[in-house]
């Protein structure tokens, strides 16, 4: 499972993929024909590493948006299988239905018991329709709150994994109280007396992300994005011009590097060379280490201390200026 089959390549990935295929062909030819291509392979591997470094160090915000949405990018359940064991998925909000866009339940990480929740996108068109492309309905957020209450009852840390374009904006979601469900989750998350870590693994879109994302700490995978609106939505509202999505991605400051500078997140988690989809196991190892580090930080803190630290974290976000009216 270390590397997924390359079913899809972004435009800026294509030169890299072409070199990878050439190296693979030479290795297969060496085995099949017994011809020594070791020098050629080493030369191509050197070129490949340099091309990867040059490409991924200088990614534009729009290119990182594309990576965050990459079809091959690991989904929540892909990572959960590698990070956790004994995962028991729990279903339903006990009010309406079981939303398949949000998955959660009890799990262990080594010997540590915890509760995990995450947005789940699909691998295929059929599965994406089943998962609603990771866009949750109100019942998804109510299910998440039910699980959070369960975690608090049994004193288990909560780890949430965010990967959604946003909460589902359909009429039926609004009729069932989408805004209220998210607002109630925000209120509840602020009061949880257990450790609570949020990790953005792909897209962190607007209120859909916030609905399960108000952790004590918020971390992002290196090429994930986190924004109040998508670049497409921003371009449509500000300029009514979809050709300006690249410009929108820049002005939104939605990359992990920019958000860390703005102190809207607390840290980044490195991805393998070429992105998380290139080596899912390495990505999972990096996430697991970040979870371990967080649990060590909060070890021994009381519920009241956790709430106070969470309160202080969110009060620090943003800058405010008071401007007096000079003409009085």
Image (cartoon, rainbow, N blue to C red):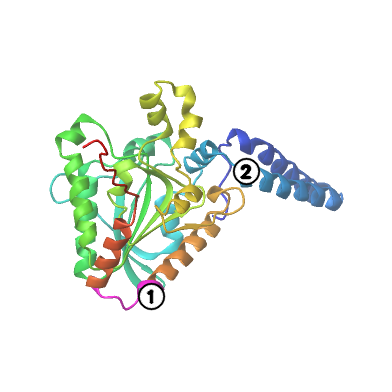
Q: Is residue 95 magenta?
A: no
On the rendered image, what quadrant is the C terminus found in? top left
* Rendering quarter of residue 252: top left
Alpha carbon separation for disc pair 1 and 2? 40 Å
What is the magenta range?
296-303
Q: Are marks 1 and 2 in contact (CB under 8 Å)?
A: no
In-front residue for pair 208/121 = 208
Q: Which residue is mark 1?
A: 111
The extreme left residue here reads: 95
User: How many discs mark residues in the rendered view?
Assistant: 2
Measured from the top left, where is residue 13 in percent x and y? 62, 38
On the rendered image, what quadrant is the N terminus found in? bottom right
| Residue at figure coordinates x 25%, y 75% from the top left | 302
Q: Which residue is mark 2?
A: 58
Measured from the top left, where is residue 129 in percent x and y? 34, 35
| Residue at figure coordinates x 37%, y 39% from the top left | 165
Which mark lies nearer to you, 1 or 2? 2
């Amino acid at each position: 499972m270390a590397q997924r089959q390359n079913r899809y390549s972004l435009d800026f990935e294509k030169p890299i993929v072409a070199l990878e295929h050439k190296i693979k062909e030479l290795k297969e030819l060496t085995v099949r024909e017994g011809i020594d291509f070791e020098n050629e392979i080493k030369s191509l591997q050197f070129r490949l590493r340099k091309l990867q470094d040059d490409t991924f160090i200088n990614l534009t915000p729009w290119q990182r948006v594309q990576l965050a949405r990459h079809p091959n990018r690991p989904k929540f359940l892909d990572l959960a299988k590698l990070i956790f064991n004994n995962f028991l998925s729990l279903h339903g909000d006990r009010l309406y239905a079981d939303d398949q866009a949000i998955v959660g339940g009890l799990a262990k990480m080594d010997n540590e018991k915890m509760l995990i929740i995450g947005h789940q996108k699909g691998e295929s068109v059929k599965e994406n329709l089943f998962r609603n492309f990771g866009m949750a309905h109100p019942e998804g957020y109510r299910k998440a709150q039910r699980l959070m209450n369960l975690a608090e009852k049994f004193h288990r840390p909560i780890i949430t994994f965010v990967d959604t374009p946003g909460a589902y904006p359909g009429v039926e979601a609004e009729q069932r109280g989408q805004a209220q469900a998210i607002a109630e989750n925000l209120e509840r998350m602020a009061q949880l007396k257990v450790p609570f870590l949020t990790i953005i693994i792909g897209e962190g879109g607007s209120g859909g992300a916030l609905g399960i994302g108000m952790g004590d700490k918020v971390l992002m995978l290196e090429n994930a994005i986190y924004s109040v609106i998508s670049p497409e939505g921003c371009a449509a509202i500000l300029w009514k011009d979809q050709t300006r999505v690249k410009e929108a991605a820049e002005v939104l400051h939605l990359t992990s590097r920019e958000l860390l500078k703005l102190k809207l997140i607390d840290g980044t988690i490195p991805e393998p060379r070429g992105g998380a989809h290139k080596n899912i196991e390495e990505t999972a190892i990096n996430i697991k280490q970040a979870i371990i580090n967080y649990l060590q930080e909060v070890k021994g803190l009381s519920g009241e201390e956790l709430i106070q630290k969470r309160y202080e974290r969110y009060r620090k976000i943003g800058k405010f200026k008071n401007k007096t009216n000079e003409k009085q």
